[in-house]
Image: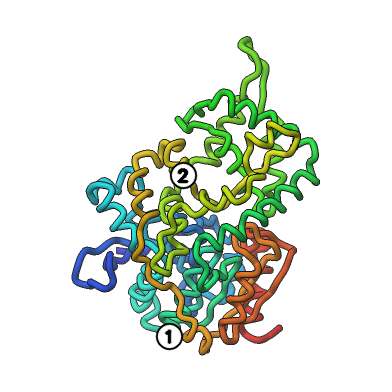
Amino acid sequence: MSLSYRQPGVVLTDRCFTVPLDHDAPDGETIELYAREVVASGKADADLPWLLYLQGGPGFGAHRFIGKQAWLGRALEDYRVLLLDQRGTGASTPANRQTLPLRGGPREQADYLTRFRADSIVRDCEAVRPQVTGGAPWTVLGQSFGGFCTVNYLSTAPEGLRAALITGGLPSLDAHADDVYRAAYPRIERKVAAHYTRYPQDVERARRIAEYVLQHEPVLPGGYRLTVEAFQSLGILLGGGEGSHRLHFLLENAFVHTPGGLALSDAFQEEVQTLLSYAGHPLYALVHEAIYGQDGRPTAWSAERVRAEFPQFDAAKALAGDGPVLFTGESVHPWMFDTDPALRPLRDTAHLLAEHTGWTPLYDPACLAANEVPAAAAVYHDDMYVDTGHALRTARAIRGLRTWVTDEFEHDGVRAGGPRVLDRLLALARDEV
């Protein structure tokens, strides 16, 4: 039974659905999905087209908006919106250290998680759509990994789409994870250089913190073991519009003087714990590299292996000389399953997923070349999370897709730019620009 309730300017309805765990075995085991329906208060009884929102990630539930925040207010002018928690996230049969042992040991857990990629998510959407729209196609808005899912949608079930809108989420159609990270590390280095140009005092601050962490390897209040590699991974902030400023404010108050000498401040440790912990989104760490698996090759901890090709990211070497300590970001490494208490119980499961060779193709180039669905994509210039070159090659491979390439926003442009970004994409999809 659906429950409806109100927030300022909107009516919300909780929706629950049952779908197969394996869509190739529809009579087998099922899982539960959760989604939140949102409609403008004055249009609660109106017959509106539907917009499905697919969150970035992988591993994050749909954003919990309050009222008409960000792009949602613009969407509600024209649509009834469905905010779907993708399988394994939010309230949709969450997959984490507490629930995965119900599957059995690491092998059973890894086998289970092979069904949590874009292809399964799209088939979930198609299973849910008739119950939501009565069978009518809907418009999909895919942010980041949600855009990856949208390209899979265009490849496998275009009949379900009225339009496809993508923000910062055009994947390479054929790149192996190694190709993705070889393109990523130079982008990250550019973002770090830009940060140090903006805040030159942070060069020395980062060196001091990295040196302290190397010497002490402190354990944060929540049990996270802070290594220098973990400290460097705070660079994930640099992919967001406010990220450089947030990183600067974090670094400026890292130390306090105590009776025992200089120490990392409680405030610094608490914020770092919050930023680094995967407790709220463990699926991101478990299947992040798997979203690039297609060709029967294992991902084999790609980001960790490829990082060795970029020795400038070695903090110990930087500290031995006078170079800056480079931050990293948007990558998952095996050491995370040792440092993070939310991931430690899943270490063996993660290794099995890294060794998996059964990844099937996610995209159909022939279908995309014949695309007839109105489609538009925001491509953020020098996006730290999704390579612009890969994105534009994919854009050219999707018939009729129109792009808006901009450096006005970073990867979180759909949040920061809100109504303006969505308005531009809708206009492009409607061929009004």
Distance Cα–Cα, label 1 vs label 2: 36 Å
Q: Quadrant of residue 227?
A: top right
- Residue 157 vertical placement versus 74 (above, below): below
Q: Quadrant of the N terminus?
A: bottom left
Label 1: how many Cα within 10 Å (few below 14, some 14–19, many 20+) = some
Reading the chain from its start, which is encountered first: label 1 or label 2? 1
Res 43 visible: no
Q: Quadrant of residue 74?
A: bottom right
Q: Residue at x 29, y 68 (%)?
A: 19
Q: Quadrant of the C terminus?
A: bottom right
Residue at the far left in the pictured view: 27
Q: Residue at x 53, y 38 (%)?
A: 274
Q: Which mark is residue 278?
A: 2
Q: Which mark is residue 159?
A: 1
Total marks in image: 2
Residue at the far top in the pictured view: 259
The reply to whether the C-beta atoms of the residues labelled 1 and 2 are less than 8 Å apart is no
